[in-house]
């Protein structure tokens, strides 16, 4: 099975900061990676699919990059509503879907 | 577009439970679906996938042989039959639409239903 390792597991940042979260696959997965945001008590929200495609309605300060084994979610100019937990997801590699362990972004 | 889960409750170890997910606002029969769970204070874990016609089904190793996913396209409903439950199955269970537009990433999610396995 392909393992998805997300880092860091938590981080502190200030409003206006640029935040970078990394997801590494244990083997090449082409661009079959998605990113989600989850707030406490809520369902996850799709931000990015196919590694770099921004989901409709998601602010442009969110961006994704990478291919193969290394992927990055970048949040430019962090806003108060961006404090949440972020997950990567390996998709489109049947029969397996695998989430990363999550990155909690907290206020510094 | 809405997904509404139901059926979560407190169940004893070794027991069984059937979760349901009612879909509305989209053509349910055209979409693959998933179950995803989240244990208290933990991350997201994919549980199971079913194709639009039920011809293809996958399970996570952690539930294989104990859980059964199914759907009724005439009723716009998705199900998860859970048997031989243990404390490790305690979680919020979400149903989520898998959209080929997003390369099978899950876009639409329900609000979740809570399953607690405890004596």
Image (spheres, coloured by chain):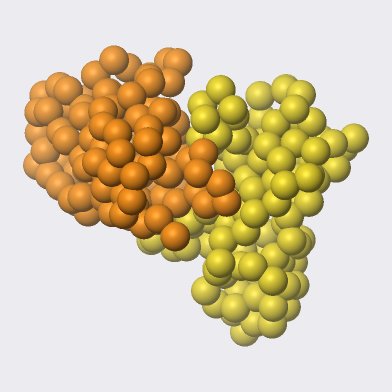
Chain colours: A orange, B yellow
In this rendered view, identify the residue nearer to me: B4 or B105.
B105
In this rendered view, identify the residue nearer to me: B83 or A13.
B83
Where is A83 relative to B78, above or below? Answer: above
The image shows residue A2 at horizontal and vertical percentages of 40, 55
User: In the displayed structure, does residue A108 sit left or right of residue A105?
Assistant: left
Q: How many marks?
A: 0
Snapshot quadrant of residue A44: top left
Residue at image position (15%, 22%) is A77
User: In the displayed structure, does residue A44 sit left or right of residue B65?
Assistant: left
Residue at image position (15%, 33%) is A19
Q: Confirm whether residue B30 shows in the render.
A: yes
Where is A82 relative to B40, above or below? Answer: above
Task: Name the quarter where the C terminus of chain A is drawn.
Answer: top left
Residue at image position (27%, 23%) is A62
Task: Find the residue positioned furthest to the right.
Answer: B74
User: In the displayed structure, does residue B41 sit left or right of residue A20?
Assistant: right
Task: Name the quarter where the N terminus of chain A is drawn.
Answer: bottom left
The image shows residue A80 at horizontal and vertical percentages of 23, 29
In this rendered view, identify the residue nearer to me: A59 or B50.
B50
Q: Confirm whether residue A15 shows in the render.
A: no
Residue at image position (26%, 48%) is A24
Snapshot quadrant of residue B104: top right
The image shows residue A101 at horizontal and vertical percentages of 33, 55
The image shows residue A58 at horizontal and vertical percentages of 38, 19
User: In the displayed structure, does residue B9 sit left or right of residue A39?
Assistant: right
């Amino acid at each position: 099975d392909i393992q998805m390792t997300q880092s860091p597991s938590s981080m502190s940042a200030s409003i206006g900061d640029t935040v970078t979260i990394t997801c590494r696959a244990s083997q090449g997965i082409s661009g079959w990676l998605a990113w989600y945001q989850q707030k406490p008590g809520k369902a996850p929200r799709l931000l990015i699919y196919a590694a770099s495609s921004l989901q409709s309605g998601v602010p442009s300060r969110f961006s994704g990059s990478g291919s193969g084994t290394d992927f990055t979610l970048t949040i430019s100019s962090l806003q108060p509503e961006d404090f949440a937990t972020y997950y990567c997801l390996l998709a489109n590699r049947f029969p397996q879907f695998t989430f990363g362990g999550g990155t909690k972004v907290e206020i510094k | 577009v809405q997904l509404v889960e139901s059926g979560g409750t407190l169940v004893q170890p070794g027991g069984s439970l059937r979760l349901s997910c009612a879909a509305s606002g989209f053509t349910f029969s055209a979409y693959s679906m998933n179950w995803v769970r989240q244990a208290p204070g933990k991350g997201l874990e994919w549980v199971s996938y079913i194709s639009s016609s039920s011809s293809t089904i996958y399970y996570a190793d952690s539930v294989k042989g104990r859980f059964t996913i199914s759907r009724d396209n005439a009723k716009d409903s998705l199900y998860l039959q859970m048997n031989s439950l243990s404390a490790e199955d305690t979680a919020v269970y979400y149903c989520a639409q898998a959209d080929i537009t997003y390369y099978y990433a899950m876009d639409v999610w329900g609000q979740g239903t809570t399953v607690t396995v405890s004596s």
